[in-house]
């Protein structure tokens, strides 16, 4: 395996981020990429509405951490974003991520890099993303709409209970009150 480290050792950093405790090394064809300790990652950046289809972590976790690091390198001008995305797809293949899942994840990061980044490697990548992305979107669109509706309904129910608890907590002496946390409607990845 091109990943030279067996385990990913992380600690939590906030609600949806983790910090590497130990380095993660990946041997490419020519280069060795080392994700340093204390690097912050969100694993796979999957919008909440699609987590049922692509969880934040899984067989592809090491590839997702590597991709986060390589994207930082690309933003700093030390690597092309298309190369970071290509290494992500290759690393997932080497981690034995199923063919369709890795290509959908690759198409998502290509689109996530922005239109300018998508066009930079050439028209063939745009066509490849369309060929992969459109059928994938059709596959997940109906369940995603239902999930968004369910999340919104759950948020409304939480809001009603929150309002009721806030209303009735005013009758309790301050020393006996328990904190009431407001509901949040989370549809984003971060």
Image (tube, rainbow, N blue to C red):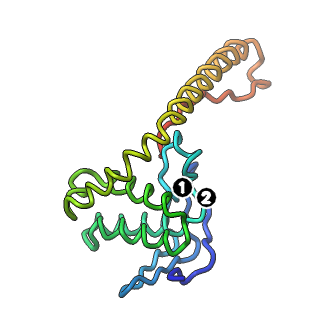
**Secondary element at image label 2:** strand
**Secondary element at image label 1:** loop
Residue at 54% x, 35% y: name it. Answer: 143
Residue at 43% x, 63% y: name it. Answer: 68
Residue at 52% x, 80% y: name it. Answer: 3
Assess disc 1: are there few (<14), some (14-19) or many (≥20) residues with their C-alpha within 10 Å of its C-alpha: some
Instruction: From the viewer's side, name the closer residue of 123 and 108.
Output: 123
**Residue 131 position in % (x across, y down):** 34, 52
Instruction: From the viewer's side, name the closer residue of 152 and 36.
Output: 152
**What separation in Å lies between label 2 and label 1 (alpha carbons)?**
6 Å
Find residue 106 and report its image quarter.
bottom left
Circle 1 is placed at which residue position?
17
State left or right for residue 126 relative to residue 99: left
State left or right for residue 56 relative to residue 112: right
**Residue 34 position in % (x across, y down):** 45, 79
Circle 2 is placed at which residue position?
12
Whether residues under marks 2 and 1 lie with C-beta atoms below 8 angstroms apart, the answer is yes
Q: Earlier in the sequence, mark 2 or mark 1?
A: 2
Reply above or below: 158 against 77. above
Reply above or below: 47 against 45. above
Reply above or below: 12 against 136. below
**Residue 45 position in % (x across, y down):** 47, 53
Assess disc 2: are there few (<14), some (14-19) or many (≥20) residues with their C-alpha within 10 Å of its C-alpha: few
Extreme-right residue of the structure: 176
Residue at 38% x, 85% y: name it. Answer: 29
Instruction: From the viewer's side, name the closer residue of 38 and 102.
Output: 102
């Amino acid at each position: 395996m091109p990943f030279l480290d067996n385990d990913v050792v992380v600690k939590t950093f906030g609600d949806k981020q983790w910090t590497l405790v130990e380095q993660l090394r990946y041997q490419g064809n020519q280069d060795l990429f080392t994700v340093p300790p204390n690097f912050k990652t969100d694993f796979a950046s999957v919008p909440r509405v699609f987590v049922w289809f692509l969880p934040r972590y899984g067989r592809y976790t090491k590839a997702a951490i590597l991709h986060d690091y390589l994207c930082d390198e690309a933003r700093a001008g030390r690597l092309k974003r298309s190369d970071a995305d290509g290494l992500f797809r290759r690393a997932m293949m080497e981690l034995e991520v199923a063919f369709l899942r890795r290509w959908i994840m690759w198409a998502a990061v290509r689109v996530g890099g922005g239109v300018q980044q998508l066009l930079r490697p050439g028209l063939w990548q745009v066509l490849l993303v369309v060929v992969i992305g459109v059928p994938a979107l059709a596959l997940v669109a109906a369940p995603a709409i239902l999930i968004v509706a369910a999340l919104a309904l759950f948020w409304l129910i939480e809001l009603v209970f929150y309002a009721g608890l806030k209303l009735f907590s005013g009758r309790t002496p301050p020393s006996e009150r328990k904190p009431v946390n407001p509901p949040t409607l989370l549809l984003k990845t971060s």
